[in-house]
Image (cartoon, rainbow, N blue to C red):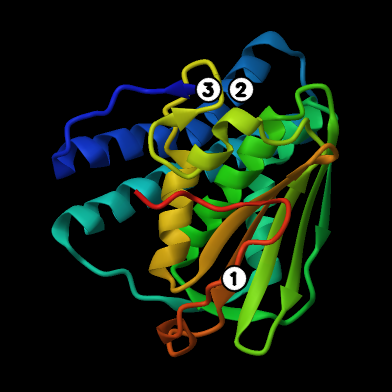
């Protein structure tokens, strides 16, 4: 476990660190695509696929920067009705190439026609963060399973991997900022910012760990009205709840 040095408590410094963290994924995608274009003799369909990946990564970067500008201005993002299956598919497309390179199989089990009223970009970023963490736990291959269960006023979403599980020494600090699991160059913000995004929607997030891998679960209200009721789930055996500080 590594606890990174805390940055300045000022808002600009916190935003700068968050920008660095969130821009890493699309920048890595662009870097990987550029390497393929330089080092490989590619067919026209392959070039077209890489171009699509480059375009998607650049769009995500622009969306992230626009969101951070809105947060700096204090502008509240308008939530919209989203199809959950489309949202999950969009997120898995972001990490699809990396999963293919690592021989990680992606399984999606999302019921049709589940609608949720959310900040689409923030929730997609939560999904991408959880999936990237899962890939980092399965460098030698495995299975990434994303599933959802519909509840009367909420939806329960799971991101499960077949990696080694969560190390006991970081379980109690899992959702704290600047805590990493020994990842090279890790900032330790992904889980903290992801959980905060879910809390801001009136939901909850927790982790479950076993010898068969890790599972991150979050519950989101279906509508803004449902979010007025805090959807707290008491911890059960195998769950890792963030420690209040």
Q: Earlier in the sequence, mark 1 or mark 3?
A: 3
The Cα–Cα distance between marks 2 and 3, rounded to whole angstroms, is: 28 Å
Quarter holding residue 45: top right
Q: Which residue is mark 3?
A: 1
Q: Position of residue 14 (x, y in %)?
A: 24, 39
Q: Is residue 224 above or below residue 38?
A: below
Q: Residue at x 16, y 40 (%)?
A: 12
Q: Residue at x 69, y 83 (%)?
A: 151
Q: Earlier in the sequence, mark 1 or mark 2?
A: 2
Q: Is residue 182 above or below residue 234?
A: above
Q: Residues within 10 Å of mark 3 (few under 14, many from 20)?
A: few
Q: Position of residue 142 (x, y in %)?
A: 86, 34
Q: Earlier in the sequence, mark 2 or mark 3?
A: 3
Q: Is residue 189 above or below residue 245?
A: above
Q: Secondary structure at mark 1?
A: loop
Q: Name the mark on residue 233.
A: 1
Residue 121 visible, this angle: no
Quarter holding residue 219: bottom right
Q: Are marks 2 and 3 in contact (CB under 8 Å)?
A: no
The Cα–Cα distance between marks 1 and 3, rounded to whole angstroms, is: 27 Å
Q: Residue at x 83, y 37 (%)?
A: 211
Q: Residues within 10 Å of mark 1 (few under 14, many from 20)?
A: few
Q: Name the mark on residue 14.
A: none
Q: Secondary structure at mark 2?
A: helix
Q: Secondary structure at mark 3?
A: loop
Single out the residue that lies furthest toward the top: 39
Q: Which residue is mark 2?
A: 32
């Amino acid at each position: 476990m590594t606890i990174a040095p805390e940055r300045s408590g000022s808002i600009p410094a916190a935003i700068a660190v968050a920008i660095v963290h969130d821009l890493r994924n699309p920048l890595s995608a662009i870097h990987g695509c550029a390497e393929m274009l330089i080092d490989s003799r590619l067919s026209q369909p392959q070039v077209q696929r890489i171009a699509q990946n480059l375009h998607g990564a650049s769009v995500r970067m622009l969306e992230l920067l626009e969101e951070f500008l809105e947060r700096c201005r204090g502008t509240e993002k308008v939530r919209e009705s989203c199809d959950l299956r489309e949202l999950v598919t969009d997120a898995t497309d972001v990490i699809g190439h990396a999963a293919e390179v690592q021989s990680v199989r992606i399984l999606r089990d999302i019921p049709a026609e589940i609608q949720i009223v959310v900040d689409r970009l923030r929730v997609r970023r939560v999904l991408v963060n959880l999936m990237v963490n899962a890939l980092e736990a399965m460098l030698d291959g495995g299975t990434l399973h994303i599933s959802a269960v519909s509840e009367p006023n909420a939806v329960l979403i799971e991101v499960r991997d077949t990696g080694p599980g969560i190390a006991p020494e970081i379980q109690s600090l899992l959702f704290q900022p600047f805590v990493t699991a020994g990842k090279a160059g890790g900032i330790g913000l992904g889980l903290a910012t992801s959980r905060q995004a879910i809390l801001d929607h009136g939901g909850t997030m927790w982790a479950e760990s076993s010898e068969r891998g890790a599972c991150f679960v979050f519950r989101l209200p279906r509508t803004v009205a449902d979010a007025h009721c805090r959807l707290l789930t008491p911890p059960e055996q195998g769950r890792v709840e963030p420690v209040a500080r």
